Image (cartoon, helix red, strand yellow):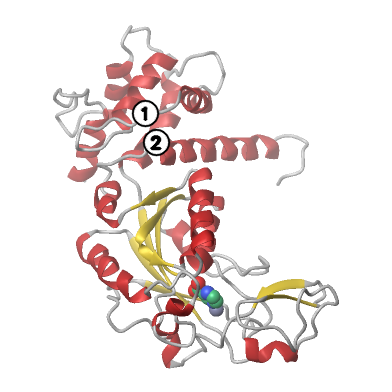
């Protein structure tokens, strides 16, 4: 508990001054409101909200992140529920409980994607792919994160295919291809994309046989630290559909237990890393963002297949308000000492959406 109180106190700390809340038993929420209600009218204007954002979105090295005016206004309007141009104390209660508390004390999950033998030195060794990257290089930085940072939960995903899996090139004649498939079964090679007949028709990139259930290739690399109380998530177990994301298979037919387990722990933030950057790591990060999580992709703890696809993965994460971070930045972020405006904005937009879902439920419109 002292840690939480400390972080909440920093919220009402002006640059280069002492925390206004020094007694941890102090009612932090009201103190915060009062500290930022500069003109004492018992309301927070956009200018006063902007000061809150200056206190929130900073790191412990004294850097204050710039938040574009348009974003400040969008976030303000999420909390100014009656749209009268001010955040009153009741509106601030929502802002405090659902936004500020998460920003200063996130609940952090660490997700290590598919750090398995086959991708490092086995049948789908990514160093043979076009980017020629070495998966072994991520093991030390991942272990360092596990050894030095207190995550609230740690997950390891495993690509876990049955022998007749649809993605294996040597299984290509087991299922009919669609007439529109760009390549036929006799000419298709590893890494080509074909279209299976279905129904419904389904695009599939072909891979060498890899990560077959219970084989050596499917084991986590022996040097990867497996944290105590961590959770393993198996994916790609349905022979008929591939599964890049750790949340969903590629057809979104079924989910793994990951989202339910994250929800159970009250997770707000997900740190993603592993193999392959532009395949399973990217798909997982993007699904994490769509599922509403504040998402951080740890760049130096990922290795991928194709440089252009890796670039595209990063662009997609950034443009959907995720973060690309270096592992050395993670500890301060996890501990709420480095608070990124992109993640604050993402959370505010989630709160806005959850609001509209609620109001839709109360109206005649069909629930989404
Ligand atoms: C993966 C290709 C096929 C991955 C899994 O883990 O990135 N890539 N199956
Ligand atoms: Zn696979």
- The answer to whether residue 246 is seen in the rendering is no
- The answer to whether residue 276 is seen in the rendering is yes
* 1 or 2: mark nearer the eye: 1
In the rendered image, residue 213, in percent from the top left (x then y), is placed at: 51, 89
Q: Residue at x 61, y 70 (%)?
A: 249
List the residue tagged with mark 2.
Answer: 341
Decide: is 21 above or below 104. Answer: above
Secondary element at tag 2: helix
In the rendered image, residue 112, in percent from the top left (x then y), is placed at: 39, 68
Secondary element at tag 1: loop
Instruction: Give the Cα separation between the discs numbered 1 and 2.
Output: 8 Å
Decide: is 180 above or below 290. Answer: below
Mark with earlier residue (1, 2): 1
User: Mark 2 vs ligand 1: CB under 8 Å?
Assistant: no
Q: Which label was assigned to residue 89?
A: none
Q: Nearer the viewer, residue 138 or 43?
A: 138
Q: Are marks 1 and 2 in contact (CB under 8 Å)?
A: yes
Q: Describe residue 144's horizontal placement relative to residue 275 as left or right.
A: left
Q: Nearer the viewer, residue 306 or 197?
A: 306
Where is residue 51, by image quadrant?
Answer: top left
List the residue tagged with mark 1.
Answer: 66
Q: Residue at x 25, y 59 (%)?
A: 150
Instruction: Sort mark 1 into few (<14), some (14-19) or many (20+) by Cα contacts within 10 Å.
Output: few
Q: Nearer the viewer, residue 68 or 76?
A: 68
Where is residue 201, by image quadrant?
Answer: bottom right
In the rendered image, residue 56, in percent from the top left (x then y), is placed at: 32, 31
Q: Residue at x 41, y 92 (%)?
A: 216
Decide: is 29 above or below 39. Answer: below
Q: Residue at x 59, y 72 (%)?
A: 243
Instruction: Sort mark 2 into few (<14), some (14-19) or many (20+) by Cα contacts within 10 Å.
Output: many
How many numbered discs, if any? 2
């Amino acid at each position: 508990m002292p840690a939480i109180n400390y972080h909440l106190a920093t919220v009402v700390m002006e640059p280069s001054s002492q925390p206004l809340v020094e007694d941890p038993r102090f009612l932090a929420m009201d103190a915060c409101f009062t500290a930022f209600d500069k003109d004492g009218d018992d309301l927070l204007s956009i200018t006063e909200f902007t000061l809150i954002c200056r206190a929130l979105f900073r790191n412990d090295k004294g850097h204050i992140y710039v938040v574009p005016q348009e974003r400040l206004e969008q976030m303000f309007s999420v909390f100014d529920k009656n749209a009268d141009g001010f955040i009153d104390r009741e509106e601030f209660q929502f802002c405090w409980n659902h936004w500020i508390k998460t920003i200063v004390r996130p609940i952090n999950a660490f997700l290590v994607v598919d750090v398995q033998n086959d991708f490092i030195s086995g049948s789908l060794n990514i160093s043979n792919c076009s980017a020629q990257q070495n998966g072994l290089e991520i093991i030390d930085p991942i272990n360092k994160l596990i050894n030095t940072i207190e995550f609230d939960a740690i997950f390891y995903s495993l690509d876990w295919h049955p022998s007749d899996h649809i993605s294996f090139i040597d299984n290509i004649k087991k299922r009919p291809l669609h007439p529109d498939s760009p390549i036929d079964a006799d000419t298709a090679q590893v890494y080509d994309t074909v279209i299976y007949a279905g129904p419904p028709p389904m695009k599939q990139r072909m891979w060498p046989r890899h990560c077959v259930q219970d084989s050596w290739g499917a084991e986590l690399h022996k040097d990867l630290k497996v944290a105590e109380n961590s959770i393993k998530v198996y994916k790609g177990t349905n022979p008929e559909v591939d599964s890049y994301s750790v949340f969903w298979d590629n057809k979104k037919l079924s989910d793994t237990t990951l989202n339910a387990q994250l929800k159970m722990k009250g997770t707000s933030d997900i740190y993603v890393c592993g193999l392959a950057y532009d395949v399973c790591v990217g798909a997982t990060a993007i699904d994490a963002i769509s599922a509403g999580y504040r998402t951080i992709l740890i760049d130096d703890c990922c290795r991928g297949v194709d440089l252009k696809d890796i670039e595209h993965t990063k662009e997609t994460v950034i443009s959907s308000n995720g973060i690309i971070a270096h592992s050395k930045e993670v500890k301060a972020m996890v501990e709420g000492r480095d608070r990124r405006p992109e993640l604050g904005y993402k959370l505010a937009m989630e709160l806005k959406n959850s609001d509209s879902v609620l109001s839709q439920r109360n109206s005649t419109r069909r629930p989404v």
